Image: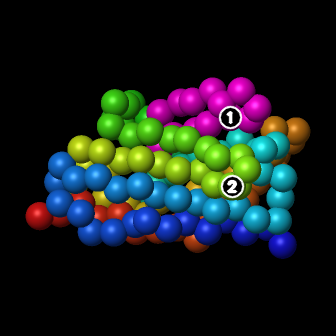
Amino acid sequence: QEQLVESGGALVQPGGSLRLSCVVSGLTFRLYHMAWYRQAPGKERELVARISSPNNEINYLDSVKGRFTISRDNPQNTVYLQMNSLKPEDTAVYYCHARTRYGTTEYWGQGTQVTVSS
Protein backbone atom coordinates (compact mmCIF):
# COMPACT_ATOMS: atom_id res chain seq x y z
CA GLN A 1 0.00 0.00 0.00
CA GLU A 2 1.32 3.39 -1.00
CA GLN A 3 2.07 5.75 1.89
CA LEU A 4 3.55 9.20 2.19
CA VAL A 5 4.29 10.18 5.78
CA GLU A 6 5.33 13.73 6.57
CA SER A 7 7.05 14.91 9.73
CA GLY A 8 8.88 17.95 11.03
CA GLY A 9 6.09 20.48 11.33
CA ALA A 10 6.12 22.65 14.45
CA LEU A 11 5.54 26.06 15.96
CA VAL A 12 8.52 28.32 15.20
CA GLN A 13 9.28 32.00 15.63
CA PRO A 14 9.65 34.32 12.64
CA GLY A 15 13.14 34.00 11.21
CA GLY A 16 13.46 30.43 12.37
CA SER A 17 14.06 27.23 10.44
CA LEU A 18 12.42 23.85 10.03
CA ARG A 19 13.11 20.76 7.97
CA LEU A 20 10.18 18.72 6.76
CA SER A 21 10.61 15.09 5.78
CA CYS A 22 8.38 12.81 3.76
CA VAL A 23 9.06 9.09 3.84
CA VAL A 24 7.48 7.16 0.98
CA SER A 25 6.63 3.46 0.91
CA GLY A 26 4.77 1.13 -1.39
CA LEU A 27 5.95 2.65 -4.65
CA THR A 28 9.18 2.95 -6.63
CA PHE A 29 10.27 6.31 -5.28
CA ARG A 30 12.91 7.07 -7.90
CA LEU A 31 10.24 6.95 -10.65
CA TYR A 32 8.16 9.70 -9.09
CA HIS A 33 8.26 13.47 -9.29
CA MET A 34 8.03 14.75 -5.72
CA ALA A 35 6.63 18.00 -4.44
CA TRP A 36 5.58 19.95 -1.38
CA TYR A 37 2.30 21.82 -1.34
CA ARG A 38 0.78 23.94 1.40
CA GLN A 39 -2.66 25.12 2.34
CA ALA A 40 -3.36 27.98 4.71
CA PRO A 41 -6.78 28.47 6.34
CA GLY A 42 -9.26 29.88 3.87
CA LYS A 43 -6.85 29.58 0.95
CA GLU A 44 -6.34 27.15 -1.89
CA ARG A 45 -3.60 24.57 -1.81
CA GLU A 46 -0.49 25.84 -3.60
CA LEU A 47 2.67 24.26 -4.95
CA VAL A 48 5.67 25.25 -2.85
CA ALA A 49 8.50 23.25 -4.41
CA ARG A 50 8.93 20.40 -6.84
CA ILE A 51 11.81 18.08 -7.71
CA SER A 52 11.53 15.93 -10.79
CA SER A 53 12.54 12.40 -11.68
CA PRO A 54 15.06 11.42 -12.94
CA ASN A 55 16.91 14.71 -13.52
CA ASN A 56 16.12 16.48 -10.21
CA GLU A 57 14.92 19.61 -11.92
CA ILE A 58 13.64 21.97 -9.23
CA ASN A 59 10.98 24.66 -9.19
CA TYR A 60 9.87 26.95 -6.35
CA LEU A 61 6.98 29.21 -5.54
CA ASP A 62 8.28 32.75 -6.00
CA SER A 63 7.65 33.72 -2.39
CA VAL A 64 9.91 30.96 -1.03
CA LYS A 65 12.82 31.27 -3.47
CA GLY A 66 16.08 31.78 -1.61
CA ARG A 67 14.57 30.58 1.68
CA PHE A 68 13.37 27.02 1.00
CA THR A 69 15.30 24.09 -0.43
CA ILE A 70 13.80 20.84 -1.68
CA SER A 71 15.91 17.71 -1.96
CA ARG A 72 15.43 13.97 -2.33
CA ASP A 73 17.27 10.87 -1.18
CA ASN A 74 16.27 8.05 -3.48
CA PRO A 75 17.90 5.19 -1.51
CA GLN A 76 16.06 6.41 1.61
CA ASN A 77 12.75 7.01 -0.26
CA THR A 78 12.60 10.45 1.32
CA VAL A 79 12.02 13.99 0.16
CA TYR A 80 12.93 16.99 2.31
CA LEU A 81 11.98 20.63 2.51
CA GLN A 82 14.47 22.84 4.35
CA MET A 83 12.74 26.06 5.32
CA ASN A 84 14.80 29.02 6.52
CA SER A 85 13.92 32.62 7.39
CA LEU A 86 10.35 31.58 8.05
CA LYS A 87 7.63 34.20 7.94
CA PRO A 88 4.13 34.24 9.46
CA GLU A 89 2.72 33.94 5.94
CA ASP A 90 4.41 30.54 5.66
CA THR A 91 1.94 29.21 8.23
CA ALA A 92 0.02 26.33 6.64
CA VAL A 93 -0.44 22.61 6.51
CA TYR A 94 2.33 21.23 4.30
CA TYR A 95 1.60 18.20 2.14
CA CYS A 96 3.92 15.80 0.39
CA HIS A 97 2.91 14.81 -3.14
CA ALA A 98 4.12 12.13 -5.53
CA ARG A 99 3.26 11.80 -9.22
CA THR A 100 4.58 9.09 -11.50
CA ARG A 101 6.71 10.32 -14.37
CA TYR A 102 4.88 7.88 -16.66
CA GLY A 103 1.35 9.15 -16.28
CA THR A 104 -1.05 10.85 -13.93
CA THR A 105 -1.15 8.55 -10.91
CA GLU A 106 -0.55 10.61 -7.80
CA TYR A 107 -0.48 10.27 -4.05
CA TRP A 108 -0.74 12.66 -1.10
CA GLY A 109 0.49 12.59 2.45
CA GLN A 110 -1.69 13.48 5.41
CA GLY A 111 -0.01 16.83 6.01
CA THR A 112 2.08 18.41 8.75
CA GLN A 113 1.29 21.74 10.43
CA VAL A 114 3.80 24.57 10.27
CA THR A 115 3.00 27.62 12.37
CA VAL A 116 5.22 30.70 12.31
CA SER A 117 4.39 33.02 15.16
CA SER A 118 6.00 34.96 17.96
Whether residue 38 is visible to the viewer of this picture, yes or no, is yes
- Taking 105 as reference, is 110 left or right? left
Q: Is residue 90 magenta?
A: no
Q: Residues within 10 Å of mark 1 (few under 14, many from 20)?
A: many
Occupied quadrant, residue 62: top left
**Quadrant including the N terminus:** bottom right
Give the residue at the far front of this rendering.
Answer: 75
Q: Which mark is residue 76?
A: 2
* Amino acid tagged 1: Ser
Q: Which residues are magenta?
A: 48-60
Q: Which residue matches tag 1? A: 52
Asked if 103 appears above or below 80 in the picture, the reply is: above
**Residue 75 image offset from top left, x and y in percent:** 73, 50
Tell which of 93 and 32 is nearer to you.
Answer: 32
- Queried whether the magenta region covers residue 52, the answer comes back as yes
Name the one closer to the observer, 34 or 23.
Answer: 23
Q: Nearer the viewer, mark 2 or mark 1?
A: 2
